[in-house]
């Protein structure tokens, strides 16, 4: 009986995998809709599909949202494992996960768009024409960052937390990469 159940589970898993591959897109740019929302993304045949949020209106669409914050309802002070795997809800505030981001950006060339709007409605953006992060083995380092355009400052910097007497993220409960605690 156990062998039959295992065989049935393998059949279901195989059929589900084939089905997901048939309805998934390699990127948000290939989603067959101009409506923003949740889509199944599979960067390559060797990657497991995942649900991602595709922004299809800003700057011509085709953008995979990997961080979305708007009201502080999700605590972003997390450990490395949570940043690797992702957290929050795709229906609210979330972080997609570094492992997914690595698979997406290493499968083909990607751009990066950072949009910021404050509570008064002031909007700025930074756009880079190339973007890639390394694997977990590389500690998800930023491996490619192309040319910048935008209205925000060009603030992405590979030199993080150079404060000589402590750790900015721990001391000030920051949940992002820092250079000098508040920069």
Image (tube, rainbow, N blue to C red):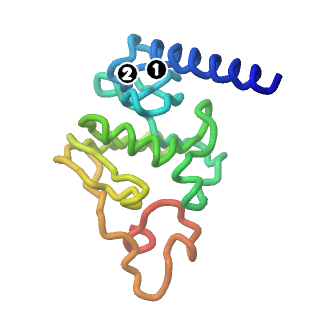
- The residue to which callout 1 is attached is 36
Mark 2 neighbour density, 10 Å: few (under 14) some (14–19) many (20 or more)? few
Q: Position of residue 96 (x, y in %)?
A: 51, 41
- The residue to which callout 2 is attached is 57
Q: Do the residues labelled 1 and 2 touch (CB within 8 Å)?
A: yes
Q: Using the image as rendered, state which of residue 94 and residue 143 is in the foreground.
A: 143
Q: Is residue 38 visible?
A: yes
Q: Position of residue 54 (x, y in %)?
A: 44, 26
- The CA span between labels 1 and 2 is 7 Å
Q: Using the image as rendered, state which of residue 90 and residue 57 is in the foreground.
A: 90
Q: Residue at (44%, 15%) from the top-left corner?
A: 35
Left or right of residue 142: residue 24: right
Mark 1 neighbour density, 10 Å: few (under 14) some (14–19) many (20 or more)? some
Q: Residue at (31%, 36%) from the top-left corner?
A: 107
Q: Residue at (80%, 27%) from the top-left corner?
A: 2
- Which residue is situated farthest in the bottom direction here? 165
Mark before the other along the chain sequence, 1 or 2: 1
Q: Where is residue 153 in the image (x, y as percent from the top left)?
A: 27, 54
Q: Say which mark, if any, is on residue 117.
A: none
């Amino acid at each position: 009986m156990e062998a039959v159940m295992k065989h049935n589970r393998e059949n279901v898993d195989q059929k589900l995998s084939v089905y997901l591959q048939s309805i998934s897109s390699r990127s948000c740019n290939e989603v067959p809709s101009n409506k923003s929302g949740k889509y199944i993304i599979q960067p390559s045949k060797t990657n497991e599909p995942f649900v991602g949020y595709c922004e299809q209106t800003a700057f011509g669409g085709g953008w995979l949202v990997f961080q979305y914050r708007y009201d502080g309802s999700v605590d972003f002070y997390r450990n490395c494992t949570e940043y690797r795997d992702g957290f929050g809800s795709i229906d609210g505030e979330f972080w997609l996960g570094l492992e997914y981001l690595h698979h997406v950006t290493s499968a083909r060339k990607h751009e990066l768009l950072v949009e910021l709007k404050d509570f008064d409605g002031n909007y700025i953006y930074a756009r880079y024409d190339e973007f890639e992060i390394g694997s977990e083995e590389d500690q998800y380092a930023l491996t490619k960052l192309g040319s910048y355009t935008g209205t925000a400052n060009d603030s992405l910097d590979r030199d993080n937390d150079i404060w000589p007497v402590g750790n900015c993220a721990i001391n000030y409960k920051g949940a992002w990469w820092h250079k000098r605690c508040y920069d």
